[in-house]
Amino acid sequence: MNPPTTPDVLVVGGGIGGLAAAFALARKGLGVRVLERAKEFGEVGAGLQIAPNCTRILADYGLLDEARELGVLPDGMVMRDALDARELTRLDLRDLERRYGYPYLVIHRSDLHGIFLRACRRAGVELLTDRTVVDYRQDGDGARVVLADGRTERAPLVIAADGLHSVARRELVGDDVVSSDYVAYRAAVPIEQVRGNGVAEHDVTVYVGPRCHFVQYALRGGEMFNQVAVFESPKAKAGDPDWGTPDELDAAFGATCDPVRTGIPLMWRDRWWQMMDRDPVETWVHGRIALLGDAAHPPLQYMAQGAIMAIEDGWVLAEHAARLTGEGGLPQWDAALAAYQDVRVEHCRRVQTTARSWGDLWHLDGEARLRRNAVLRERATDDYAFTDWIYGPTALTPDREPPMFTPVPLAGARPEERPAR
Ligand code: FAD
């Protein structure tokens, strides 16, 4: 049987993006129902970095204190060379907090997901599991979803927050995921297991190396240590469908410095994540169906902004829904959806494309690696030109979107190497 009442909004997918959007809309007084295909709500994986453009929203939601308690506020973000371990550049995260007004924190994925799940329950969101959506249909001044068991559900607005392999994206856009040929291994272990390995417990450390990188930071009040090992898979390059296997992990990090190599045996070996994104698209809103989170803009993870963008999406949509109301105080959905798409598409396109080039920069080899290292070492710790466009307040309208970082020509660069103005 179908649930008896029609909600104002149906959200497909109860990941971080779907739950955050459901909460954002419910706190504006809307009736929201979440349909999640899994038997239980939850998150697989380890840590997430949450930058000030997201902690600002958590503060607005009254959820920042809980996130601080469950997470860790690192002192610094340090980039090192993965071959010789030398420091390349650093962000002082206390100074960064002063600049942007909100902290940079790291948190276990399941803890952030749990924060939104509890917030949804308190806000009266209807949370339904074991509901796989297989089809989407426009339906007059609303939309309808079809579930795997044949039941249908309808609402004035359907939000598809069903992730990278979104059914809605396949139906509405029809594009394919883009494989990067890189794969991620993760691990979160008790901190005692890495003490003595010379790890920096109070920093986020990123070792960048030829066709690989390695990330480390503490989680859960410092009790756990999170590691992510990412590398290019030779098997993927050769077209082998079974790529990214543990033998490739060991080989990829064989020539790296001691602090990285010591971390590799701790990685989980029963599961790995082939890294994929999609090309940006300009239309996320199709009638009364709106894409959100990874369904709309899955990035490669190099900017650590994927979950953040999903959370921003929900905040922006809810702000417009609350502002643009019509009869009976209900949102004028077409206007709110247009405003959402107007501002979010360009922001997320910038993050997606920057993430791809950021990955290229991290993974350089040979001469190019040495040149990159020299340039990064020149950066002043308090130079925020790279982060202002992303860590500032989330824009509600395109005119509030900060300009992107424009590189200044390097002293001595040939004219053709200077960026066009
Ligand atoms: P998902 O998390 O994929 O959730 C989709 C949900 O929809 C799932 O619960 C799924 O079960 C459900 N679903 C799917 N299909 C259906 C269906 N047909 N019917 C019903 N339900 C369905 N981001 C950051 O901000 N910071 C980081 O530090 C960071 N690090 C990362 C590190 C790695 C290695 C990776 C791979 C990603 C990282 N990200 C990071 C990105 C981030 O994990 C994702 O962008 C984010 O989780 C996307 O959330 P989502 O809710 O849109 O999608």
Image: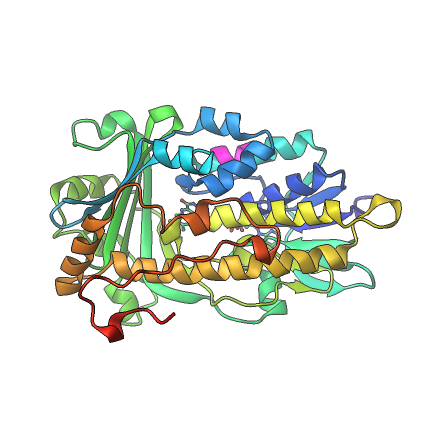
**In this picture, is 258 found above or below 140?**
above
Is residue 129 shown in magenta?
A: no
Q: Quadrant of the C terminus?
A: bottom left
Please give the name of the residue rendered at 54% of the width and 33% of the height, measured from the top-left corner. 114
172 left or right of 71 in image: right
Q: Foreground: 244 or 304?
A: 304
Q: Is residue 329 left or right of residue 104?
A: right
* Furthest-right residue in this view: 327
Residue drawn 34% across the image and 62% down it: 357
Q: Is residue 415 above or below residue 258?
A: below
Q: Position of residue 292 (x, y in %)?
A: 59, 54
> Where does residue 254 sit, x and y in percent of width and height?
14, 52
- Which of 41/16 is in front? 16
Which stretch did the figure color magenta?
111-115
Q: Residue at 16% of width from left, 54% of height from top?
A: 374
Q: Quick check: 204 left or right of 111?
A: left
